[in-house]
Image (tube, coloured by chain):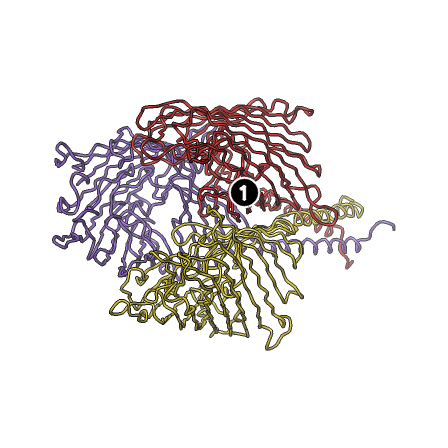
Chain colours: A red, B purple, C yellow
Amino acid sequence: EQGPSLEQLDQRIKILERQLENQKEEADAKAKDAATVAAGSNGFSIKSAKGDYEFKFRGLLQADGRFFLSDGPAASVRSNDGFLLRRVEPTFELTLGKQLFFRIQPNFAPDSATVSDVYGELRLDPAAVIRAGKFKVPVVLENLQASGATAFNERGFPNELGPNRDYGVQLGGALFGGTTSYALGIFNGASDGRDGAQQAKTAGDNRKEFAGRVFSEPFKNEPGLLQGLGFGVGGTYGTRERGTVGISDLAYRTPGQNTFFSYVSSGSVFTQSHGYEYRVSPQAYYYRNSFGLVAEYIENAQQVITNTGSKADTLHHKAYQGVANYFLTGEDASYGGLTKPKNPLGKDGYGAFELVARYGVLDIDDKTFPTFASATASASKASTWAAGLNWYPVNNLKIDLAYSLTRFDGGAAGTPSTVVVDRQDEKLVYSRFQIWF
Amino acid sequence: EQGPSLEQLDQRIKILERQLENQKEEADAKAKDAATVAAGSNGFSIKSAKGDYEFKFRGLLQADGRFFLSDGPAASVRSNDGFLLRRVEPTFELTLGKQLFFRIQPNFAPDSATVSDVYGELRLDPAAVIRAGKFKVPVVLENLQASGATAFNERGFPNELGPNRDYGVQLGGALFGGTTSYALGIFNGASDGRDGAQQAKTAGDNRKEFAGRVFSEPFKNEPGLLQGLGFGVGGTYGTRERGTVGISDLAYRTPGQNTFFSYVSSGSVFTQSHGYEYRVSPQAYYYRNSFGLVAEYIENAQQVITNTGSKADTLHHKAYQGVANYFLTGEDASYGGLTKPKNPLGKDGYGAFELVARYGVLDIDDKTFPTFASATASASKASTWAAGLNWYPVNNLKIDLAYSLTRFDGGAAGTPSTVVVDRQDEKLVYSRFQIWF
Amino acid sequence: EQGPSLEQLDQRIKILERQLENQKEEADAKAKDAATVAAGSNGFSIKSAKGDYEFKFRGLLQADGRFFLSDGPAASVRSNDGFLLRRVEPTFELTLGKQLFFRIQPNFAPDSATVSDVYGELRLDPAAVIRAGKFKVPVVLENLQASGATAFNERGFPNELGPNRDYGVQLGGALFGGTTSYALGIFNGASDGRDGAQQAKTAGDNRKEFAGRVFSEPFKNEPGLLQGLGFGVGGTYGTRERGTVGISDLAYRTPGQNTFFSYVSSGSVFTQSHGYEYRVSPQAYYYRNSFGLVAEYIENAQQVITNTGSKADTLHHKAYQGVANYFLTGEDASYGGLTKPKNPLGKDGYGAFELVARYGVLDIDDKTFPTFASATASASKASTWAAGLNWYPVNNLKIDLAYSLTRFDGGAAGTPSTVVVDRQDEKLVYSRFQIWF
């Protein structure tokens, strides 16, 4: 009679059942409301419970070494060896509700801080995304590839004839079940191979540049030989007032970042831009298993005139390149690059190894010489062969080493100094320590 | 006899009760110690369990377009159209214990990175907060409003005669139940409309500037017609050695960011600052339901002298403005700005719409001409009318469009070039894509 | 007969037992996978469940005031009083798996943004860490101390003769149970007291600088009188092409950041660097309870030549200093600095108080004058006495005030102007508001 009765036990069990139920409901409610965090090889994030607000932190470090096997005689040629920070980009990606996205990517390299990408996106629909700010102009294929993902440390010649980042507004999106992407924008107008400038304090410079690109991977969702094939075309069209845009900004560089072509921009007779500039760039890539290939061509037409107005012409410069990569260790090649080796450095593995190769040409319009550019100072053609080995010892790290040989047609003075000779070959060994997440 | 006994069941229930109790206690203890995160339209944060340590990330993007309907002839006039980044401000707000606060607000726009706000606060008491670093000098009402919250893209004329941010130390706080705020500080001394400079390498420049402001909302806590009324006065007083501070930094700008007034700063006879400068700015705002009004006046007195010492004077420049805003869609107007529309773009809504209007005048002291400034180069008066429409389609996004017309008295040369005529009107259309959280 | 049966109760208890078990397992599984966050006086972090990925945010603010009691006559002497931001360093420390570490430390002070530290580390072993990027060259003891932890606002004279940060690659680690650390690196070569430059566009400048340091705390793990003793030696060796490196970058500064020595760098006969430069710096510290002492010496040998080649020499400059600190309030002194006072400002405490004192000398090689430097412009010797009081009112905050007196041998012109007299003493009061976490 002193032990518990059945009824008492029943009562206590009921209480326990209710408590357990409450506890479960509370935990579920909490989990539904609580923001969550993540930390891993894809970056670090804080996310609202519903997932519609997200803070994401990413980063890129490129610490390079450059060693020239061919020391040039002229101070205008960068032939000294040295270490440098190529890119230091802590990046904030912010999702603010279901339709708003905000990307802030400062760059603290080489010696001062500025912004690489800074833009907002109003995502009305997957097929209609409005983007405003500073971002890559949609033209050149290798330019649009993330700088952490390119096969070599520096991009190839087509990049020199296309625009880089610019200030403007763009409408873009994905069509046909995501197999095709398009972008159409209006920008301030970027000089070849360079970033555009902000609204400048220059009377009369009201020019704008229109840019567009369409790219398709028609077999993206069909496993097979052609699944990794993508192709498209990008281009720009812009006009400019005569003399308003510095022709001195138009200069083309080697893989060692030496300028080998520029217009005559001083003296009694010099070159001015005027009229229009357009660019057209057909492009393709192909990825299958461990193999990848990027191939692209660009034609750049620009109207120039001498300051005296005595001579004017439309010059057609051209560039093309092929870049191939192959993973010796079996990883899948992709346009997006690699961050995780199959067998990281440790007990059993040595990381991933990738072979890369490039051939590229930049051909200046023959009509450029001698009126608009000096044949003894600017080469009329440059061609590059390069090969390298990329090592990914652990997640998020790439250490690479490459050799590049660039040959020129003209661009240097012989004896007497009016005789045009070929500029000295650029022989460059470059290396990189890259962290990317 | 093979089934469980009452005593056995009682025992098992006791164990369950104990386990449930333990589990609850553990969960509570964990929750008490665990730092938490939040993600939403107010930003992203990591907070200690007690709430005394907090990391908060906020951001501001202002991607602008400027289009001038009146192209000026002179290269000194910014009349070209273009896109630009006006502000790119990722912001870290750090609470470190109950008394310490630290704000880091870099600005990556327009073309290089610097800091907007960087300061620490030792919060001894709500009425006694010591602030040190670089921050806004407490004077001009619209200047102190967050740049994401102002009615128009650019602030008005009173801002041109007041200081912007400066380096120094300030004591401030809230009094009378939070209805009144005050601030008193000592700074390096900022040029009109500009940021102050860091300690400069200039012999003899030991000047300091004192600044103070008091602002009251006496009916803040009493619902009614006057609840949204605030008024106050700010001012500065500083002295400077003759010639030590560049008179060339004193220049006043239009809404299109064109300079319409500056002193003679070169040639055989030019202007130098010396003696004192003071500023006084009475100010008020009024908010009721969807309507808001900011009204302010500033008088700026500065002593100038010619380099030869032959002429000296104290010049009194004045500016005032009224800025009104009204939400067509019923949102509450406030000094703090809007981040959430009532009915965001989607099934039922089109976001919030706000009408804004401004009238402002900047009047240069007549004694300035012709000794200290050139009447054919600098206008003696500028007045602006502006109206605009701001659209808040979703949380944290504002897209705006405004028109501004600025007229001048003098400031240009006629025929012959010694005749003073009115500078050409500035007709400006400006637009902004703003993300703010 | 209508009440529950024993079997029914048994069944319900079994269900409860199973549910409780499941709930516990689920919670454990969740905790094992969930990333966690932390917020406190050591900073803010997001960490993966296993702890191998971590995002850590730290910060440093140094808002200084400098007041000279001795206003110099020359514009080249910084004798004006003023406020400034000395360092603004939001810092991201990223651990990416067990072997990869990435540090991004921008500096937004004084007037523009650049990077202090940016480097990646591949941690093969505690004794073998490869570091690449931009970071402090391992030489001078006080230079390697965190800038938030030094006793005075500015580092002493040995720092002027050593390198600061540079671009390069280093192998380092801990040996002998962590009692000894070593570092060996190759760098671009930093000018004395300055950061190194990125790969420059200068023909022929292929020089590199090798740096190394070993430091030991042999009694680190043995409590007693000698536990806090550490000593070691650092040094560099580099060569340079004649004339390729600007001799104008070699200039030595006072605690008030005024240059008191520089080479003749213009005119018909001026000084060029050539040949080699080496530095050797024996160093030690000692910490016991509230007392700390840093003592260091550096000899810097550099080869110089006149531009005409008529005179050449190897100059040996020397510097040494002792810096002592003592906590009046009983906190432990350490090389790592203090962030938490024992009794913070509040009911019972007034924070921590620390006394600091320094004596230092920089002695220029007598052979320098008059060929390579002007005796009436550059002092041949500078010696500094300084004393100060540091207050740590609450966690993460330091407010300090110090006085420094620097005397010179030579360095100024008398009457006539060819007579060498002693440069005017520098009497400096400096103060700092520092937030550090």
User: Is residue C131 depicted above or below C179 in this figure?
Assistant: above
Residue B38 position, x and y percent, is 52, 46
In this figure, which residue is indicated by the disc labeled 1? Answer: A70
User: Is residue A170 depicted above or below B319 in this figure?
Assistant: above
Type of amino acid under label 1: Ser
Residue furthest toward the right?
B1
Residue at mark 1: chain: A
Residue B427 position, x and y percent, is 26, 31
Residue C240 position, x and y percent, is 49, 55
Front-most of residues B304 and C263: C263
Q: Do we see residue A100 in this rendering?
A: yes
The image quadrant of residue A416 is top left
Tag 1: Cα neighbours inside 10 Å, few (<14), some, or many (≥20)? few
Residue furthest toward the bottom?
C225
Residue A46 position, x and y percent, is 55, 45
Left or right for B325, reference C187: left
- Give the secondary structure at mark 1: loop
Q: Do we see residue A120 in this rendering?
A: no
Q: Residue at x 54, y 73 (%)?
A: C286
